[in-house]
Image (cartoon, rainbow, N blue to C red):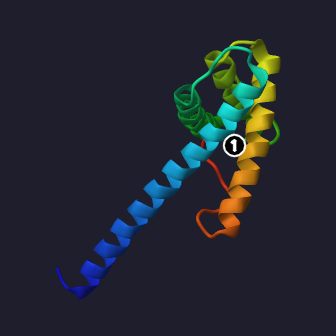
Amino acid sequence: MDGADTVIAQASGAAVIDTVFVFVVSLIIGAVGIYAGARLLIDEDTSFWLALVTAFLGAIVWAVVSFFIGWIPLLGPLLTLIVWLGVINWQYPGGWISATGIAIVAWIVTGVVLYVLNVLGVVGLSALGVP
């Protein structure tokens, strides 16, 4: 390996570490938002672990559905959002209305947390667990 290859390998390694860090932080922030929404709107006791799993599954479902149909104007993003809400509906009791409420609270909480972290220079304004 010559000097240029070493620099490229180090930069690639740093990029992977940065990507993993942003993914984990975003996932945790998304889970915090979902957890706050669930605690506020669901009468049953809920766990942070369930919110973390929901955020993870929601991010995967959002990415897959968005990849296949997200490009369709208006319909693609709408269907992607409905599928993401379906993940929340599947994970928590209360139906579609509760799932929508959880999603709205999650979005608000996530926005506030991400804004604060962005001001502090920790992460950018995006979260994988909450679209």
- Could you say whether the residue bearing mark 1 is in a helix, strand or loop? loop
For disc 1, the neighbor class at 10 Å (few under 14, some 14 to 19, many from 20) is some
Kindly indicate the quadrant of the structure image that contains residue 54: top right
Residue 3, position as x, y percentages in the image: 23, 87
Name the residue at 78% across, 23% down. Answer: 41
* Quadrant housing the N terminus: bottom left
Q: The disc labelled 1 sits on which kind of residue? A: Pro
User: Residue 103 versus residue 47: which sits nearer the camera?
Assistant: 47
Residue 39 screen position, x and y as percent: 71, 26
Left or right: 30 in relation to 96: left
Q: How many marks?
A: 1
Query: x and y percent of residue 90 in the render?
Result: 64, 16
Residue 82 in view, yes or no:
no
**Measuring 78% from the left and 36% from the top, which residue is drawn there?**
105
Mark 1 — residue?
A: 131
User: In the displayed image of the protein, which residue is found farthest to the left?
Assistant: 1
Q: Is residue 57 left or right of residue 13?
A: right
The residue nearer to you, when weighing 58 against 118, is 118
Left or right side of 14 for 70:
right
Q: Is 129 located above or below residue 90 in the figure? A: below
Q: Residue 25 placed where, x, y %?
A: 54, 51
Residue at the extreme bottom: 3
Tell me the residue at 71%/61% (across/down). 116
Q: Within the image, what quadrant is residue 34 found in?
A: top right
Residue in front for this viewpoint, 103 or 6: 103
Image quadrant containing the C terminus: top right
Q: Residue at x 37, y 74 (%)?
A: 11
Q: Is residue 2 visible?
A: yes
